[in-house]
Amino acid sequence: MSEITTIGVVGAGQMGAGIAHVAAVTGYTVLLADADRARAEQGKAGIEKRLGRSVEKGRLSAEDAAAAAGRIRPVDGLDDFAGADLVIEAVSEREDLKKSIFTRLDAVCGPAAIFASNTSSIPITRMAAWTSRPERFIGMHFMNPVPVMKLVEIIRGLATDDATYAAVKALAEQMGKTTVLARDMPGFVVNRVLMPMINEAVVALYEGIGSVQDIDIAMKLGTNQPMGPLTLADFIGLDTCLAIMEVLHGGTGDSKYRPCPLLRQYVEAGWLGRKSGRGFYDYGK
Ligand code: NAD
């Protein structure tokens, strides 16, 4: 397999920008695309701001930050991805959208290019089958915020070959991450374990077992977690938590994964956590 030097990142949002940031600091040339050029440029501007903060904090030299920014090239769209050795897709979690992206990429990119998806919940095997290269298709599940979080969950689809797995594992390690290998089953490892815990914290609130504060303090101090599960749910977004529980529930058919009715009600009320100003806590927006 040829060496990876140019990485295409599709989606310049929270995750895509984080992936582009770390890839550029590591020394890769990054082609950054979003729905249009302006959004890709906006994504790069955000990365430059965060690189500047790393310089202020003494974590990165000004020269290295400038060199990293210089390696990120916002592009007009996927037609500019022909030279990418590997493409990491991090667009919104909508299956129809991801399908149109991968169909287009499959036509534009060279046959040796590897495709990776940062999806939290869509089966890798299903996505791989949309392309002509299921053996070079893999899941690369980064955690948020990407520059800070050390883990990348790698998910092999049914057809993913050993060379693709080895290349992507080496890339993630090059980016300073620790990898784990997960089977292509609903939730992979992290969300399979984390989301039922968060859902159960909502059940504890729903059943009046404890207050929001007491549930969070109990789990924080009683199990040594950096933040309580309801604080974490607000941070992730309650709509995202609900969507992942629905994937676990639907994908396994096991009733133990049913989303708590209170979680659903919060989402219906528009109380989505930090991003909407209110979730289990009030952020005063
Ligand atoms: P986000 O909303 O911050 O970013 C999504 C980006 O996709 C936006 O910039 C949007 O403009 C772009 N987009 C929409 N349509 C597009 C198109 N046609 N072409 C190109 N770009 C388009 O979302 P996010 O949190 O960065 O999530 C992205 C992916 O990462 C999702 O699959 C999500 O499940 C996964 N993920 C998220 C987290 C998290 O904690 N946020 C963690 C792990 C994985």
Image (cartoon, grey):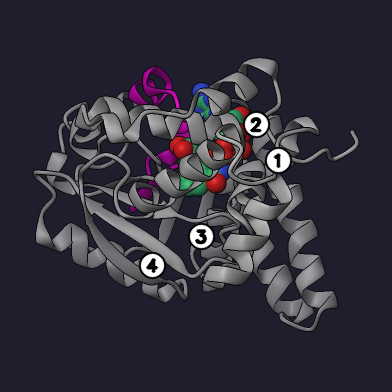
Magenta stretch: give its range. 76-102
Q: Which residue is mark 2?
A: 37
Nearer to me, 240 or 259: 259
Badge 2 crowding class, 10 Å Cα cut-off, few under 14, some 14 to 19, many 20 or more, is some
Q: Residue 29 has which mark?
A: 3
Residue 239 spot, x, y in % from top left: 56, 28
Q: Are discs 2 and 1 less than 8 Å apart at CB?
A: yes
Residue 285 spot, x, y in % from top left: 89, 33
Badge 4 crowding class, 10 Å Cα cut-off, few under 14, some 14 to 19, many 20 or more, is many
Q: Is residue 53 above or below residue 182?
A: below
* Magenta span contains residue 91: yes
Badge 3 crowding class, 10 Å Cα cut-off, few under 14, some 14 to 19, many 20 or more, is many
Mark 4 or 3: the one toward you = 4
Residue located 60% across and 39% down the image = 205
The amino acid type found where label 2 is placed reads Arg
Q: Which residue is mark 4?
A: 172
* Magenta span contains residue 36: no
Q: Residue furthest right?
A: 284
* Quarter of the view holding residue 72: bottom right
| Separation of residues labelled 4 and 3 (CA atoms) | 15 Å
| Separation of residues labelled 4 and 1 (CA atoms) | 25 Å
Badge 1 crowding class, 10 Å Cα cut-off, few under 14, some 14 to 19, many 20 or more, is many
